[in-house]
Amino acid sequence: MTKKPFYKNLFLQVIIAIIAGVAFGYFDPARAIAMKPLGDGFINLIKMMIAPIIFCTIVSGIAGMGDMKQVGRVGAKAILWFEIITTLALVIGLILVEILKPGATLHIDVTQFDTSAVREKMASAGMGSASDFFMHIIPSTLVSAFAGGEILQVLLVAILFASALAKLGSKGREALAIIESFSHVLFKMVDIITLAAPVGAFGAMAYTVGKFGVGSLKELGELVLIFYATGILFIFLVLAPVMRFYCKLSTWQFLKYLREELTIVLGTSSSETVLPRMMEKLVALGCSKPVVGLVIPAGYSFNLVGSSIYFTMGALFICYATNTPITLWQELTLLGVLLITSKGAAGVTGSAFLVLAATLSSMHLIPQQNLEVGLALIFAIDRFMSTGRARVNLVGNGLATVMIARWENALDHGLAADILAGRKEPDLALMEQ
């Protein structure tokens, strides 16, 4: 297999684009802000592919599996793992922010602080009940799930559709062949769109630096550094041992394997931009297609470990920065509520901030003026924190898929070890077979 010229390497292209975007945003902020459509356009191109790809992948996997008990077992294992790991993320974020107390030295005078920038954002943040969340999973029409790009709704439709196909016998297999052929076209479209990743990363990064500036990082850098450090610690102290001792694979090698996807997320601040590529990479690594098809889409709503760390850190940072006292009981109550509301933070850029705002507004733990000031502080650096959230979420979902595939005896361990060690090249076409 001939090696591609270095200038055709997507990882290198995106890195160069990010550096160029940062430089452009720093030296010419006014023009850099106008680059926002480049980043948004790339994200939208990928997002339009997600719903049909998830549908085709899940239908193909479940109908091909033909055993609904196995489907239920994989789903139950995934949800159990998601709940355990997100709870750990919330608790670790709570403990570290209690120890390090970021924002405690700011002593913000809330009466002298302009919160107009965040009020418009808060107006769109509303937290429904648990029943509202579950009712939202059911689409109003069969096509509305695809039109709205709602991952959980598409997941439900796909499972029902696949279950029906599995019961139709030969007629179902004819329909399945059509769907599998269609999925080949979709993944080829994703390959074409991904060629524009450097352009999207440049536009998104230029806008971010031009709009918010590196000054916001200097002022609130302590919180950003603690958040990034916590995310790294979580990966290597919580997830890595599972990968090493249970899956018998190297987390560091796994991160190298996903370097292109992690770099794209660094530029776009959204883990959704690489969802189709993640599915391709994990199937190529030796995880079975049905497991990948079920775990990855579900993980984008239920396994947001990066966002979970952000929620507890953000909430307590606001308390410290605005001199708002909070008791241990209130912290534990906040933790319990976040276990539920964190499930509403999908992989879209900025959604975690809205969930944080909605949760704190509904709980009335922090006076309204203090809350607005604290959210305004976080909003100033949220774009930078969003990048960290998305990358930790991405790694968490990837490792969860490998772990559950191993749990189901649906992981080709020898192939995975060879690919991660560089002894074999991954066959990305496996997803299309």
Image (cartoon, rainbow, N blue to C red):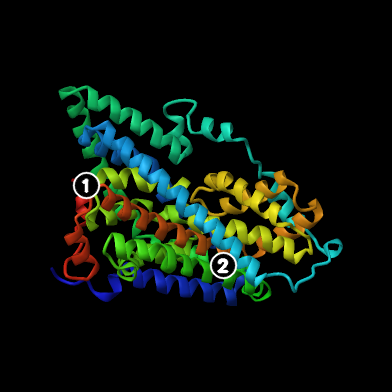
What residue is shown with label 2? 227
Are discs 1 and 2 less than 8 Å apart at CB?
Answer: no
**Is residue 360 placed above or below 250 in the rendered structure?**
above
Say which element carries label 1: helix
Residue found farthest to the right: 111
Residue 21 position, x and y percent, is: 50, 71
Say which element carries label 2: helix
Visible residue check, residue 131: yes
**Is residue 67 placed above or below 344 in the rendered structure?**
above
Q: In the image, what residue type sits under mark 1?
A: Glu
Viewer-closest of 83 and 279: 83
Q: How crowded is mark 2: few (under 14 residues within 10 Å), some or many (20 or more)?
A: many
Residue 96 position, x and y percent, is: 59, 67
Tell me the residue at 54%/44% (across/down).
344
Residue found farthest to the left: 1
Point out the frontmost of discs 1 and 2.
2
Q: In the image, what residue type sits under mark 2?
A: Phe
Viewer-closest of 254 and 262: 254
Tell me the residue at 40%/60% (across/down).
395
What residue is shown with label 1? 432
